[in-house]
């Protein structure tokens, strides 16, 4: 790269060469969005916590549902993050559409298909054991039914409750080249794009929590309406907002740095107001029936009232979610300014960011494997949530670390396998053997189904470790090339 000051011609021989040698090379600018690493890690952690709360607490627990309401910012935060990162990468360079699709769908499409199949098989095994899996092949009709079921899950992302995120992400990748084209040709008018997008976002969220319009009341339109939450439509404003923020990154970053203290205060007020209204809405709904006579109604009615008040598509709730997204980005800017490259926190966060996608994909498997034993009647709900969360995160990290070292890493985590030369095969082998023993104890001694998964994961680690040891030995046996 040529510096701003041109080097003089070599007319004075070695003296000029010596002076040039003393000039230190210009440091390469770090263009990595380190604030996004922290945002991504916290958001993935929030997803797991939300699912833990939903899984182990009572649906009548008003406090738990209030926390869950705030944690559902993750849904919108992920899509804003996707638009932000994509636009930041491509705003100043040419985008080859076919190459973009090929790389993006490889990294997310393959894991989506693999994990959809894993969850499809796993849930049927949990429901009926090996007998349920054998029944799939008992007749031509059952095979056809299974194929239709798998096809439905691949289309909708419905194999497990969190895979819709990948389905929507692939829709974002499909439209992003066109969206970037629009952004580049409407520079100077992006505020108007956001206004139109925001108006549509408000309308569709208002409509989604009410009976469908006549046009959507039957047939294919009704099917579309029932599946709107797995389409891009209810999230388009957040994607566009992320794109616009990244397109004007320098101005956006300067604004955040200047006003982040004020933004924190505004966000805190918005979040508090949302929670106050949530409590009011729950109390009002639970204590007043349609006749206004003060009857609390049935348990089902109370559950409906609480879930409705915490609904992620309630327009009045979305302001708190926007506030959380903004506040977390502000927190990320503090990390960006204070991080020390190469430090332990920096390395830990970078590694955690690398593993986060795999953790998202696999956490539902580990959480489900803890049921029903983890639901301990009478235990303090906060303690139960904390214990379940810690165990789920630990098991999922174990799963992802094994996958990242295995030959199926790209298929299951969207990341290339850790180079065998960088792995400690013997240590992995020992951990695998210990994992098998630990899983057997959990299954045989405590009748915990999660022991089955731990054994399966440990066996994969053992096989991967043996493959690594063989590969390292093969490389060591090759003759070393002597440079000319």
Image (tube, helix red, strand yellow):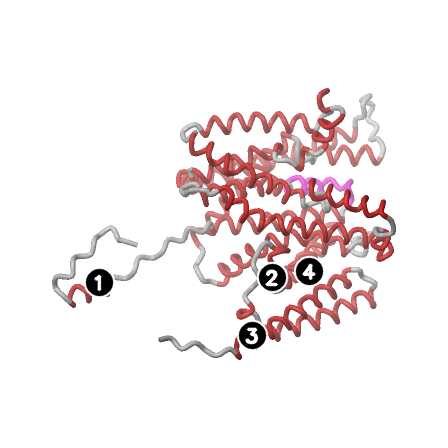
Q: Nearer the viewer, residue 161 or 34?
A: 161
Instruction: First in sequence, mark 3 or 4: give its number.
Output: 4
Q: Judging from the image, what secondary structure is the residue with disc 4 in? A: helix
Residue tagged 1: 20
Residue 201 on image: x %, y %: 59, 29
Q: Residues within 10 Å of mark 3 (few under 14, many from 20)?
A: some
User: What segment is highlighted magenta in the picture?
Assistant: 58-71
Q: Nearer the viewer, residue 455 or 94?
A: 94
**Disc 1 and disc 2: Cα gap in Å?**
44 Å
Say if the magenta span includes residue 63: yes
Q: Does residue 123 appear left or right of residue 99 in this picture?
A: right
Q: Are marks 4 and 1 in contact (CB under 8 Å)?
A: no
Q: Which element carries disc 2, helix, strand or loop?
A: helix
- Closer to the N terminus: mark 3 or mark 2? 2
Mark 1 to mark 3: distance in Å?
Answer: 43 Å
**Does 18 lie within the magenta span?**
no
Q: As displayed, is residue 383 above or below residue 433?
A: above
| Nearer the observer, 68 or 184 | 184
Residue 273 appears anywhere in the view:
no
The crowding category of the residue bearing disc 2, from other C-alpha atoms within 10 Å (few below 14, some 14 to 19, many at least 20), is many
On screen, residue 422 above or below 257: below
Whichever of labels 2 and 4 marks the residue nearer the N terminus, that label is 4
Q: Nearer the viewer, mark 1 or mark 3?
A: 3
Report whether 297 appears left or right of 412.
right
Q: Main secondary structure of the magenta part?
A: helix
Name the residue carrying label 3: 472
The residue that disc 4 covers is: 395
Mark 3 to mark 4 CA distance (whole Å): 28 Å
């Amino acid at each position: 790269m040529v510096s701003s000051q041109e080097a003089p011609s070599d007319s004075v021989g070695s003296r000029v060469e010596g002076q040039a040698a003393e000039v230190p090379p210009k440091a390469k600018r770090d263009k990595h969005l380190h604030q996004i690493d922290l945002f991504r890690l916290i958001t993935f952690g929030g997803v797991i916590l939300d699912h833990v709360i939903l899984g182990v607490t009572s649906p009548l627990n008003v406090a738990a549902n209030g926390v869950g309401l705030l944690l559902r910012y993750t849904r919108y935060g992920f899509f804003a993050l996707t638009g932000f990162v994509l636009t930041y990468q491509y705003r100043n360079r040419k985008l080859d559409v076919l190459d973009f699709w090929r790389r993006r769908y490889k990294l997310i499409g393959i894991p989506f298909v693999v994990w959809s199949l894993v969850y499809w098989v796993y849930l049927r095994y949990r429901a009926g054991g090996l007998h349920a899996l054998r029944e799939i092949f008992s007749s031509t009709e059952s095979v056809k039914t299974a194929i239709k079921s798998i096809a439905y899950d691949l289309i909708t992302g419905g194999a497990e409750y969190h895979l819709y995120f990948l389905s929507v992400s692939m829709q974002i990748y499909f439209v992003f080249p066109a969206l970037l084209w629009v952004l580049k040709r409407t520079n100077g008018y992006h505020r108007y794009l956001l206004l139109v997008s925001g108006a549509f976002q408000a309308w569709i969220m208002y409509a989604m929590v009410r009976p469908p319009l006549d046009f959507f009341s039957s047939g294919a339109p009704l099917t579309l309406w029932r599946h709107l939450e797995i389409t891009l439509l209810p999230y388009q404003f957040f994607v566009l907002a992320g794109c616009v923020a990244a397109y004007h990154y320098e101005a956006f970053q300067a604004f955040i740095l200047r006003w982040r203290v004020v933004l924190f205060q505004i966000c805190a007020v918005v979040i508090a107001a949302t929670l106050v209204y949530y409590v009011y809405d729950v109390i009002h709904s639970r204590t007043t029936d349609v006749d206004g006579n003060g009857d609390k109604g049935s348990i089902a009615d109370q559950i409906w009232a609480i879930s409705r008040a915490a609904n992620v598509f309630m327009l009045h709730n979305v302001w708190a979610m926007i506030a959380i997204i903004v506040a977390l980005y502000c927190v990320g800017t503090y990390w960006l300014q204070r991080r020390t490259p190469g430090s332990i926190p920096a390395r830990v966060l970078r590694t955690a960011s690398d593993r986060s996608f795999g953790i998202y994909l696999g956490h539902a498997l580990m959480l489900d494997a803890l049921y029903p034993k983890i639901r301990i009647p009478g235990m303090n709900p906060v303690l139960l949530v904390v214990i379940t969360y810690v165990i789920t995160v630990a098991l999922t990290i174990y799963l992802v670390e094994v996958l990242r070292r295995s030959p199926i890493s790209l298929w299951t985590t969207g990341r290339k396998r850790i180079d065998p030369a960088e792995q400690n095969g013997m240590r992995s082998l020992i951990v695998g053997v210990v994992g098998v023993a630990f899983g057997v104890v959990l299954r045989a001694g405590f009748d915990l189904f999660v022991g089955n998964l731990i054994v399966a994961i440990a066996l994969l680690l053992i096989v991967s470790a043996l493959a690594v040891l063989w590969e390292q030995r093969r490389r060591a046996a090759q003759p070393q090339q002597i440079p000319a």
